[in-house]
Amino acid sequence: MTTAAGEAAGRLAAPEVGASRPAERAAILAVAQNTGVFTPEEVATVAELFDGYLAGSQQSGYNFLTARAVATGAVLGFACWGPTSLSRGAADLYWIAADPAAQGQGVAAALFRAVEDALRTAGRWLLVIWTSSRPEYAPARAFYLRMGAELAMQLNDFYDRGDDLCVFVCRW
């Protein structure tokens, strides 16, 4: 499976979003790596969570969705989410990423809406999103606000000195 780099220039059509497939593992990891935001440790964590998902989302608690180009099936982005342990209504959004060639074209928004739909179907009403205060995460923080999430908390020096934890929540 290829990433969006092989897509034709110009605006992409709305992506198809569905459950991630085992054959998409390499393309999903390429998206994570190509964003230029995730550290090698974070990319390795995406791989670990995806492997848990493949082994069984009920056991692992991890669910993956893939955004695909309608015309080619190329992987444009992915999202990983799961129910929050010991909570009846909350879920965590662990990752959402769009291939750099597809950023700004509605891929992340389509993934976010698909996660919300899955959570509503599962009877969940609160999405919790942890992210960093580092400058390279500013577009992600702005994206969450555009999607209707609110910044519920900022914990200084959580990830490292000068790298705060920003917790966003989305309720319905």
Image (cartoon, rainbow, N blue to C red):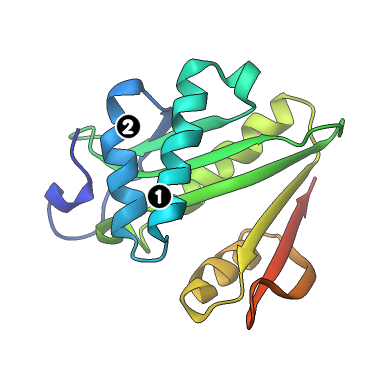
Circle 2 crowding by C-alpha within 10 Å: few under 14, some 14–19, many from 20: some
The image quadrant where one finds the N terminus is top left
| Residue 14 visible to the viewer | yes
Residue 43 place in picture, x, y as percent: 40, 50
Question: Residue 133 or 5: which is nearer the viewer?
Answer: 133
Judging by the rendered image, the residue that carries numbered circle 1 is 43
Q: Is residue 90 above or below residue 168?
A: above
In the rendering, which numbered label is found on residue 5?
none
The amino acid sitting under disc 1 is: Val
Please report contact status of discs 2 and 1: CB closer than 8 Å, yes or no: no
- Element under label 1? helix
Residue drawn where x is 65% and y is 40% of the image: 116
Name which residue lies at 17% across and 52% down.
Answer: 5
Give the x, y percent position of residue 96. 50, 50
Mark 2 / mark 1, whichever is N-terminal: 2
Q: Secondary structure at mark 2?
A: helix
Placement of the C terminus among the 4 image quadrants: top right
The answer to whether residue 18 is left or right of residue 151 is left
Left or right, residue 42 beside residue 90: left
- Residue occupying the point 27% across, 39% down: 27
Q: Say if 15 sits above or below 139 in the image.
A: above
Give the alpha-carbon distance from disc 2 to disc 1, as whole Å. 12 Å
- Name the kind of residue labelled 2 in the image: Arg
For mark 2, what is the residue?
Answer: 25
Q: Dot 1, how many residues are within 10 Å of its Cα: few (below 14), some (14-19), or many (20+)? A: some
Quarter of the view holding residue 11:
bottom left
Counting the numbered discs, the total is 2
- In this view, the mark in front (2 or 1): 1
Q: Quadrant of residue 16?
A: top left
Figure quadrant of residue 167: bottom right
